Every structure is written in structure tokens, then in C-alpha cells.
Amino acid sequence: MKAKKGMAFLLAVMMLVTMVLAGCGNNGAGTETTGTTDTEVTASGKSSGSSGGVTEVTFWTLNTRQNAVDPIVEAFNSQNKDIKVTVAYYDTDGIKDACKVAASSGTLPNMWFNWGGSLGGFYADNGLCYDLTEYAKKNDWENKFSAGVLNLCQLGGQLSGYPTSYNVLDVYYRKDIFAQYGIQVPTTFEEFEAACATLKENGITPISTAGLNGWHVMRFVELLIEHYAGSELHDSMNTFDSSYNCDAVVQALAKYKEFCEKGYFPAGFVTADPNDTRMAVFSGTAAMDIQGQWYDGMIIQEEQDMNLYDTFAFPSGGTNRLSAFAEMTQFNAKNTDAQLEACMKFMDYYYSDENAEKYAEYYNMPLPKIGAKMPEGQPNVAKMLATAETNGTFTITDQAFPTEVADALFNVQDAIANGQMEPAEGAAKIQEAIEAYQAANK
């Protein structure tokens, strides 16, 4: 890929910058911010650098982690009088939008949470995030982080982030609901369909999902594609070596349409917030949710009975591979040496074993470090990672795809669910977006 791909998108969002910055006052976090520490961020969204011997740095992250990050930042600032970290919070989609807008105006924070694949790759491809290749060599990262997660953070020909988690997704289910209706854990796709039919007949929504911004519904659609395409073709399509306009994708979208029509998803799911899907499972109105190992932490946060929850690999066929992805912290390419060192010192503190143990339910455990311990009281984490090791994984679609193509998939999902598009047209639309992307990035 060419270095500067995606800059056309930045030009497109420039019109939004003035409005967003005008609305964010002095916290630089935009309208999605749910809170900051007691230190102000400048209107540009970046820290003022070094003032009076204190290096000030800004950090944007997810609001789902605020209960851990707030006390961690407070303790770090107290212990490090020469550094001051300011944090701003966003929801999952808010941080994607805020970072893209900030990228277009040169106001990215000193460090920000991001995912791997195309999401993090955008900042590497456009020279916006710090190349950590030499830093990692000097600081012996190969003996600190697992080789697999370091590989996933290699984007745009550089090491593009500080690894914070390696995640795999599985089907979480309510054991008590399955037992109540005599449902065995499905080992074939046909058994999975039968389980969904039994649940629906008894007034239980089989699969909790939500379509707002597309990525949660995608978790199910990509498993259907894995089922009908098989692992080899699925991988080839995701690298754009094979066409998405094929029988396997048409079959997958047709099955998705069938599940929509049968009411196997919650009513009104297309416009529902994906951050709320767990509520239906926790209340017992839905039986399954496709989630990563962070779900154990959510079960603890919501004071649910962990004994009611278990996981199984979606029976797609073959080895029943799991979807997987990495998370990282990226650093502004314009950081000074002092700012980068301050950011790294904070990251090492944030992801220390001590803090991870203290606030375990707010981390995606285990940490992606060599010799990391499994979290206590989160039994599904070790099981899921062992399943991934045995079954294998594929890169989650919204990281395998560039944003333009992922958006096309999301639009297809919505249109099919709303009865506005047929599966064959959907497959053609996805491939059309792929070809347009390839033509624009030759």
C-alpha cells in the first residue's frame, strides 16, 4: 500500500474539524468525552509539552475503562512529579471518529487507544503514529511481549503501537437457559440452527446483537462467511486475492437474512447500541452473544453469577476458527523524546502486573506479555485462548478490511436486515467497494 493512502478521507472530514473543536471547549475530547482528569487539555487536543520541568502528555481511551484509568492516572501523576498525564474518554465508535478528525487537523493527542489491522494501520500508513521499531529493539520488547501480538502491531512497515491485549472471540451462552430447554452445546451448524429454533419457540432471543455502526452484527456475519467459504477461501477474500462476489458470500448473507426474518436477533437490533448487547443476556431475555474474553470482566462488573456463563466455538466447520484481533496504544509521530518517554513510563505503569491484578475486570486479560498470568475468577479467558490455540484464528473483518470496505459491509448488513437488499446484490456491493478501494490506492 502506498504511504499516504487514506489522506483523501482526511480532506473529506476537514469540514467537520472547526465545528468539532468549537464544541469541545478546552478539553480537546470532542462531544463523545465522558470525563477527564483534573488537568486541562489545550484546545488543539494536545498537551502543552513541557512546562516548568513537567512533561505534560494527553491520552485518549475508552470510557468502559474509566473506573480503572482514573485512579491509575491519579496515582501515576502523584508518584511522578515531572510528568502529568491528562486523559479523555470516548465510546468505541467515538474514539475512532475523534482520532480521524484530530488526524485531519494535526491535533492528535500524545497517545491514544487503538486496534490493529486497518484501524491502527491508517495512522502508520499516513505517518501519524510513532515508529517504535528502534525503541522496541533498544528496550528488548522481544523478551517482554509475546511474538504473536508484536506481529499484529506491525502495520505499514513499522511497529505501530504498544501492545495492550490480544483478543479472541467466542460464543458466550447462558448455561441455565440451555439446560432449561434441553439444549446441548452445538457441535455442527445444523445443531446451532436447531438450538436457535428451540430458543425462539420458548420466547428467548437466540443471539443478542446490535447494528449501530455495524461491527457487532459483523461478528456473526463473518462466522457465516467462514462457514460457507471455509478457511482458505475466507482468508483469500480478506486479502482481496479472491472476490467477495461469490456463492459462499451470497449463501452467508442469505442465511443472515433468514435469521433476521425468523427473529433470531432482538427486535430493532439494526439501530441498537452494540455496547448494550450484554444486557439482554444478563437479564435472561437472550441466550447468546459473540464476545471476546473481556466479557468475563463485564460479568464481574455487572455482579452476575459467573457460574451461569460458558463459551463454545461457533460450529463453522473445519477447525471452527475464532475471530481475533490486537489492541494497542499508539503515539503521536510528533512527540518529542521527553514526551515519548513520559508516555512509555505511563504505559508501563498502566499495564503493570500490579494494576492489572488490582483492576482485572477493566483489562482484556491476560496481558500480552511473556509469562503473563491468567486472571483469577475469569474462567472463560483461559478456555477461549486454549480454543484459539487449538482451532486457529482469522483476523476480525473490520481490521482485515480498510474502513471504506468495512463500511460497505456494514451498509449491506443493514439493508438486508431491513429488507432493502437481496444477498446477491450485497455480495456484489462489497466487491464493488473492494475494487474501488484498490483503484484508489494503486
Image (spheres, rainbow, N blue to C red):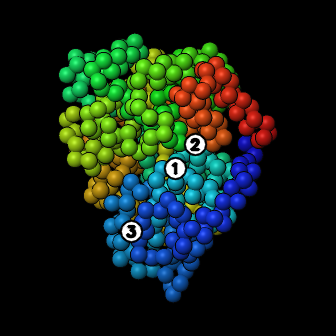
Mark whose residue sits in front, 3 or 1: 1
The local crowd at label 3, few if under 14, some if 14 to 19, many if 20 or more residues have their Cα within 10 Å, is: some
The local crowd at label 1, few if under 14, some if 14 to 19, many if 20 or more residues have their Cα within 10 Å, is: few
The answer to whether residue 186 is visible is: no
Q: Which residue is mark 1?
A: 93
The answer to whether residue 307 is visible is: yes
For marks 3 and 1 on the same chain, the one whose residue lies earlier in the sequence? 3
Report x, y in % for residue 218. 51, 33
Q: Which mark is residue 117?
A: 2
| Image quadrant containing the C terminus | top right
SS label for mark 3: helix
Name the image quarter holding residue 45. bottom right
Report x, y in % for residue 75. 34, 71
SS label for mark 2: helix
Q: Residue at x 66, y 59 (%)?
A: 16
Callouts 3 and 1 close, C-beta under 8 Å: no
Q: Which residue is mark 3?
A: 73
SS label for mark 1: helix
For marks 2 and 3 on the same chain, the one whose residue lies earlier in the sequence? 3
Q: Amino acid at mark 3?
A: Val
CA gap, disc 1 and disc 2: 16 Å
Q: In the displayed structure, would residue 126 be above or below residue 55?
A: above
Q: In the displayed structure, would residue 28 be above or below residue 192?
A: below
